[in-house]
Image (cartoon, rainbow, N blue to C red):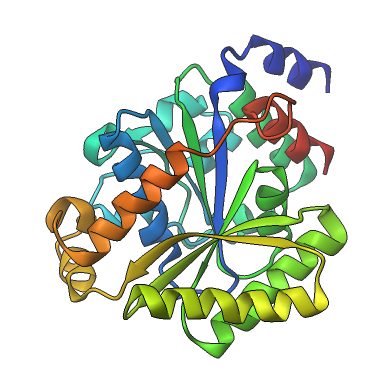
Amino acid sequence: MIDQASGLRKMQDLQQIKVIAVSGGKGGVGKTNVSLNTAIALAQLGKQVLVLDADLGLANVDVMLGLRVQRNLSHVLSGECELDDIIIEGPAGIKIIPATSGTQSMVDLTPNEHAGLIRAFSDMQTKFDILIVDTAAGISDMVLSFCRASQNVMLVVCDEPTSITDCYALMKLLSRDHEVFKFKVVANMVRSPNEGQQLFEKLSKVSDRFLDVGLELVGVVPFDENIRKSGRKQKAIIEAFPNSPASIGFRNLAKNIMKWPIPHQPSGHLEFFIEQLLEH
């Protein structure tokens, strides 16, 4: 605990960092696509962005971008290297912390390993303005921890009953057990802005009825065949097809994020993010 506290004190410019957890309950809603393309769009607007692949057992951020990874979070936890040593650079200069794939032990971290992950964050030297945490699918303890510790929880939802149900379940757990009451919503893979608004209203209707939470629609990303094409090329759509409808949606989302305030109180800064993880 003392070592971790001293590590926290070493971090600089904490008040300038926005922490955004991208989640959504079920898999297949395009959560990682949203994380990566939004990160690239923010970098194109002049921000230094760090993406944490927080799907600790089935990492795919590096695969989606065709990046070669030599070391990942498992090497940090084993003490082989520091967190700064595994960071790789992606499109537009974004920085990425890669996780492992197909490693069960990374899904079931021991308390010591969890503390080691937090300590690694507290000792980071890499500078950035925005941390985007691309969480795993589902509602595991790790997903809940990352969401609870972040300043902003951005939920990706598509127009499928299971997506809406799972999104609701995640909001229910976070609000009931972790005191997270505000959520940003991205309507993904919709046919029109109007459909995106209707999807948001469906989610709002069920949450208003049963939960004491506040929702805000912050982005609408249309269904775009170019996402599949860019995926085959192992490129982000915003780079492969910059003028496509989805790319425009991601850029609009990034512009929206640029306006989000950084609170004056500690909540939401990187120090708070780490301390929240440490607490649990």
Point out the image quarter for the N terminus.
top right
Q: Which residue is drawn at 50% across and 28% down?
A: 83
Across and down, in percent, residue 45 comes to: 29, 34
Across and down, in percent, residue 86 comes to: 41, 32
142 sits to left or right of 21: right
Q: Which residue lies furthest to the bottom in this view?
A: 161
Where 181 falls versus 160 (above or below)?
above
Q: Residue at x 76, y 31 (%)?
A: 275
Q: Which residue lies furthest to the front in this view?
A: 194
Closer to us: 119 or 254? 254
Q: Residue at x 26, y 36 (%)?
A: 44
198 sits to left or right of 204: left
Instruction: Answer with the quarter of the image where residue 69 lies.
Output: top left
92 sits to left or right of 270: left
Where 61 falls versus 229 (above or below)?
above
Where 40 falls versus 23 (above or below)?
above
Closer to us: 218 or 246? 218
Q: Which residue is drawn at 60% across and 28% down?
A: 121
Point out the image quarter for the C terminus.
top right
Across and down, in percent, residue 133 comes to: 53, 47
